[in-house]
Amino acid sequence: MKLGAQGRVLTVTLAHSGCTNDALQRYWLNHHAHRLIKAIGKVEDSLKNQYLSESNLDLVKQTVAVLERQWLSWTLHITPTSEFEQALYTLKELQQWQANDIAAFRAKYIQYYANKYQHFFDSVEAQPLTAAQRQACIIRDDSHLLLAGAGTGKTSVMVSRAKFLVYSDVATPEQVLLLAYGSEAAKELKQRAGESFECLTFHALGMLVIAAVEGKQPQLSELTNDAKKRFRFVQDTLQVLCLQPGYKGLFEQFCIKECHIQPNLDLAEFIRSARCKAVIAHITSLLSVYKNVVALGQLTRIASQQSDLLKCLTPIIDEYQSYLDTEGAIDFEDMIAKAIAYIEADRFNVPWQHIMVDEFQDLSPIRAELLKALMKAKNKRYLFAVGDDWQSIYRFSGADITLTTQFEAHFGRVTITALDKTFRYPQDVLDISSRFVCANPHQLKKYVKSARTETGPTLQMETVECEANTLEKVLAQLNDKGEACVLLLARFHKMLPSRDELVDLQGKFKALKIRAMTFHAAKGKEAEYAVIMGLYEGHTGFPANRPIQPLMEAMLPARETFSFAEERRLFYVALTRAKRRVYLFKPQDNACRFLAELEIKSNTH
Ligand SMILES: Nc1ncnc2c1ncn2[C@@H]1O[C@H](COP(=O)(O)OP(=O)(O)OP(=O)(O)O)[C@@H](O)[C@H]1O
């Protein structure tokens, strides 16, 4: 402050008094030139030693604006030292920086570090990283979203980037947090990145924060851990509530409007009956969603839309919450909500400077709040998010795709980069699946090439009369070709071979490792071959078209306007699992509408 104030006084004197006395200028420079040299040196160091993030750019611009007023608003009449002249030159250059200069500067920085750490990038994973993967490791903006399609090596980037931060002395492993969607993925990250890194699910992160603040591990409610107990709790609560005349009507309406089930006249008997199972199961899922809605402050909006349905749910929630309180325990929702509260109240000292999130497209609003709380905690933090809006398939459990597609609106300025090569599936699968998913104009565009060299029909459509027969034929052909993994995929479990049938198939085709799973479960998996089954239209078919219950619908993130948007992405996930070939079983009648869009010729069996 003092320096600036002195400088400004003298600048005014020199510039406006008409005094151009060389001796005075020399005197001024002798005493103050080192300040410009030092300030420019500091700017240069920050530009050299760290990626020019948006917030660094702001700082540079602010510094340049101050220096500009002090040093460029008057004419120099004497010959300065070369050091001062150089500083002045740099200041003038910085003053004139345009968007393209900034982009070029950043590109040079990336190139410099890609060369400097070439050996690391060549050897950190089994295969050398691509240029785009290296770039994703080097860029360190305040927020960085890496958007990339299936099989482009996103997980490789997560692992390599964490290791690079440590290898290049930017961070210690303790300063890096890797967040994954599920515990299996978190375990894989830990295995690949190394024990010293914290690799957690959001719930595990919540537990860690609460344990640190409260000084002991929080106790998880038995209703959270045990689905049967949770079911029984809701059942018993309903029995008691339905003794109240005022509640009876609310519950009947709830069964009809929310679950399309007409309850028996004897409600106590109905609640114990098999018909009521679906209602109770639905209420147990609403418990979790409701708590998130409350934590996000959205209850008033829901109440204005679905007040009667909510009136039926609220007393059950109240009972549930007092049960937890009596137990002195928490549930999964509390893990996140409490952690947010502790971080926001500054009761948890956030040790991580680099927060890296995998499968970002599956983020829910409440998890986004947890991330924002971490990012807002004291000291500088960097957010690195890896995701693929084309694979966002979890709205039913709260995922909000707009957190990815409108990242900036939620998390502020961001650098978005992409991965441009898929290593998993051949070019024609890439072309067809990308075209298919982008029929929804709201999906972000991606430009990817396949690194695989397979030729021939890698996406094969078989018109089938009997799926089981065609499956045997296809497996027999593959079995003859030699050892391989085969994924049998369908929208729902019931469309796949049963466990016993699978054992039979495995016994017959010994060269193959056959696994059957739903489209959802196939996310992140890969195999040589994939067979996609159950591709028929209808209430129980694909795309699934059962409407979500009104209260649940109101509590989930807003539905997309494009019809079957999520079912389309699910099909994209299924199409992109195989390295060599995908078989699509097309029923003779009533084939799934998506098949016509793929425009592939069909073989008949
Ligand atoms: N630079 C690379 N060179 C060669 N193969 C690579 C490279 N990076 C990743 N791979 C391979 O590509 C395949 C896909 O990688 P990975 O599972 O990380 O992709 P992903 O983008 O996370 O996929 P998905 O989104 O479908 O889960 C893996 O077999 C991985 O070993």
Image: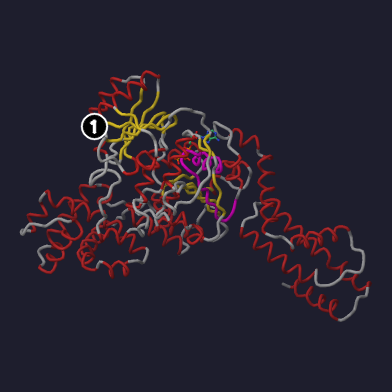
Q: Which image quadrant: the C terminus?
A: top left
- 161 magenta-colored: yes
**What percent of the width, then of the height, locates residue 317?**
24, 61
Give the residue at mark 1: 498
* In the foreground, 442 or 190: 442
Q: Left or right: where does residue 592 sit relative to residue 25?
A: left
User: Is the C-beta of the residue carrying label 1 under 8 Å from the nearest atom of ligand 1?
Assistant: no
Callout 1: few (<14), some (14-19), or many (20+) C-alpha neighbours within 10 Å? few
User: In the current view of this chain or complex, which residue is farthest to the left?
Assistant: 266
- 486 magenta-colored: no
SS at mark 1? Answer: loop
**What percent of the width, then of the height, locates residue 516?**
31, 33
Residue at left 55%, top 52%? 416
Amino acid type of the residue that numbered disc 1 sits on in the rendered structure: Ser
Residue at left 23%, top 63%? 318
Q: Left or right: where does residue 241 sit relative to residue 464?
A: left
In the rendered view, tell whether residue 83 sits above or below residue 73: above
* In the foreground, 383 or 503: 503
**What percent of the width, then of the height, locates residue 553?**
29, 59
**What percent of the width, then of the height, locates residue 507?**
28, 20
* In the foreground, 176 or 79: 79
Q: Which residues fall within the magenta stretch?
A: 140-162
Q: Left or right: where does residue 92 sit relative to residue 332?
A: right
